[in-house]
Amino acid sequence: MLSSPKSRRVAAILALAGAVPIVGGFHLVGLHKLYLGQRWWCLIYVALALTGSKVAWIAGVFDAMFYLIQNPDEFDANFNDEPLAETGTGSGTFGAAKSNPVVAVSDSLRELDQLRQDGLISEYEFEQKRRKLLDRIK
């Protein structure tokens, strides 16, 4: 299950399930984060729920809405480690990237580094994505 592609609908259903109280008013918050492989976020949601705060399940509802309105390609890029599809029709580096995975990974690393330099992703997110990209070469 951990290596299979993640579904937007399943993630949204699990996020909404966290908002519905079960036995004794306990909420199953964070299941969607666990499903998506974000264990630390799952622990944060559970910790917030254990304090009695409603923030965790409200955030789960917002997460569910976000997953459902998010473009499927963006969801795959974020949670299934699939690169976003190119929209250009030129045969520049994208044409070369199809034939050579090293070129594709190096181009992706450059784009990822630019996102980090622009402050759009954190150093931690950069390092995670960089490792996954480099694992594709091996």
Image (spheres, helix red, strand yellow):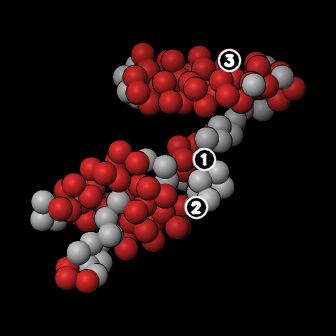
Q: Is residue 60 above or below residue 23?
A: above
* Pick the front one: 83 or 54: 54
**Residue at position x 49%, y 49% in the image:** 37
Q: What separation in Å lies between label 1 and label 3 (alpha carbons)?
A: 19 Å
Residue placed furthest toward the left: 52
Circle 2 residues within 10 Å: few <14, some 14–19, many ≥20:
some
Please state which amino acid type lies under the numbered disc 1.
Asn
Image location (x, y in percent) of residue 93 = 76, 19
Asked if marks 1 and 3 touch (Cβ < 8 Å), the reply is no
Q: Quadrant of the N terminus?
A: bottom right
Q: Is residue 6 left or right of residue 28?
A: right
Placement of the C terminus among the 4 image quadrants: top right
Q: Residues within 10 Å of mark 3 (few under 14, many from 20)?
A: some
- Mark 3, residue position: 106
Amino acid type at circle 3 is Ser
**Which mark sits nearer the N-terminus, 2 or 3?**
2
Q: Which residue is depicted at the point 65% across and 42% down? A: 82
Q: Which residue is mark 1?
A: 80
Q: Residue at x 69, y 35 (%)?
A: 86
Left or right of 111, for residue 97:
right
Image quarter of residue 132: top right
Classify mark 3: helix, strand or loop: helix
Q: How far apart are the two marked residues, 1 and 2, measured between alpha carbons?
A: 9 Å
**In this figure, which residue is indicated by the disc labeled 2?**
7
The number of numbered badges drawn on the structure is 3
Looking at the image, tell me whether mark 1 or mark 2 is earlier in sequence order. 2
Give x and y (percent) for residue 76: 60, 48
